[in-house]
Structures are given as C-alpha cells and as structure tokens.
Amino acid sequence: MSAEPPNRWLAEAAGRSRTYDQRWEELAAAGRNVHGEADLVEILGPRSVLDAGCGTGRVAIELARRGLEVAGVDVDAGMLEQARAKRPELEWVHADLATFDLGRTFDAAVLAGNVMIFLARGTEARVLSRVAAHVNPGGLVVAGFSLEPERLDLATYERLAHAGGLEPVDRWATWDRQPYAAGGNYVVSVHRRVAAP
C-alpha cells in the first residue's frame, strides 16, 4: 500500500500547473472580473497579505499591483515557478501550509482557489493554525472554498478556525459578497485572529 500523497492538489491535479492560468485568461478576455478575491481583500483594508496556497500568483500579483505588501506560499513547485516568472521581485515560498514558518506576520491572509479542500486529509487544523500564526492579532483570515461531499464542511471549518484562535467576522456565498444561505455550495469566510493558535 502506497503512502498518502502530501496533499490532494498534488495527487488530483498533477500537471494542471501548466494550464491553470488559461481559464482565468479566457474569463478576462470575455470581460469577466477575475479579481474578486483581491477586490474583497482590498476592501477589508490590510496593508500586508499572505497568499496561502498562492498557486501561479494571480491573487498576490493583483494585490501587489494595488500597492499591498504580499508574500505567496504554495506546495506546488510548478505553479510557483510560473508565479516567479511573472513577478520575480515578489516573495514566493515553496512550502507545505501545514508546517511553513516565514518568521513574520501580516495584516491578513487569504486562502483562495479551494485551498482548504485540496489539503492532505487531517492537516486542515494544522494549516489554519499555521496561517493564523502568520496574522497579526486582530488581523483577518479569508478563505473561500467549495462545499462538496467528502470534503471539508462548513461546521468543521468553523470548529477548526475557532481552535486556531480565530473568531468569525463575516460569511458570503461569493467573493463579491453575495449573501450566504445554508445549503449553498460555496463559502467565503472571514475570521479575525483573537488568540495565539
């Protein structure tokens, strides 16, 4: 029996790093707003943002374009290679979110792109704790993810966030702040760091 892969993204989406940006480029070409995550994070008012699970850097790069200090962390080396090629002057760190330590904190952290449901099973609590540890007291953690069977459910996420020293601030169904209704299939949750995880 083989060992479980480091995370579900690496196991399920192997090779997608090469084509990941294509979808966003097509949406942008069709006139769609592809920066909903950056729009929401900017509205929340941080000066510095950790993009946890940054992928090819779409969110971090847009936030940097808007004048925010950013750093991106991801476990997928192929995606980070693309992020570095686009904006080599930004900080890109190859690391597992369950164990990373940048040695500093930020005003906010964002986990976009379904990061929470692609983690290795059983590491969700460690990831939220590590992310919270990188946010200033009173700072925000913003996570958006699909609510799918056999993945992370909202009640579990809320419990894990609380255990990581985070309190709920707001919840929406989309990054453009459409109201969340019970039974929805996507959630964007905002929590504030109130205690050391």
Image (cartoon, rainbow, N blue to C red):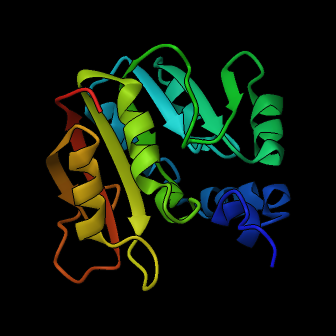
The residue drawn where x is 41% and y is 17% is 105
Residue 53: x and y in percent read 58, 45
125 left or right of 87 in image:
left
Considering depth in this image, is 114 or 172 the residue closer to the camera? 114
Going 67% across and 19% down the picture, which residue do you hit? 90
Query: In this rendering, does residue 190 appear at all?
Result: no
Does residue 175 show up?
Answer: yes
User: Quarter of the image holding residue 180?
Assistant: bottom left
Q: Is residue 48 left or right of residue 119?
A: left
Q: Residue at x 73, y 54 (%)?
A: 21
Q: Position of residue 113 (x, y in %)?
A: 53, 57
Is residue 15 shown above or below 196? below
Q: Position of residue 27 (x, y in %)?
A: 61, 63
Task: Give the total number of marks visible in the rendering.
Answer: 0
Left or right? Give the position of 147 relative to 116. left
Query: Closest to the observer: 86 or 4?
Result: 4
Q: Nearer the viewer, residue 38 or 138?
A: 138
**Which corner quadrant holds the C terminus?**
top left
Residue in front for this viewpoint, 46 or 166:
166
Residue at the (47%, 13%) spot, across then down: 104
Quadrant housing the N terminus: bottom right
Compared to 176, does 121 lie above or below? Answer: below
Quarter of the image for residue 15 reads bottom right
Answer with the quarter of the image where residue 195 lies.
Answer: top left
Q: Outermost residue, front direction?
A: 1
Residue 52, percent from left and from top:
52, 39
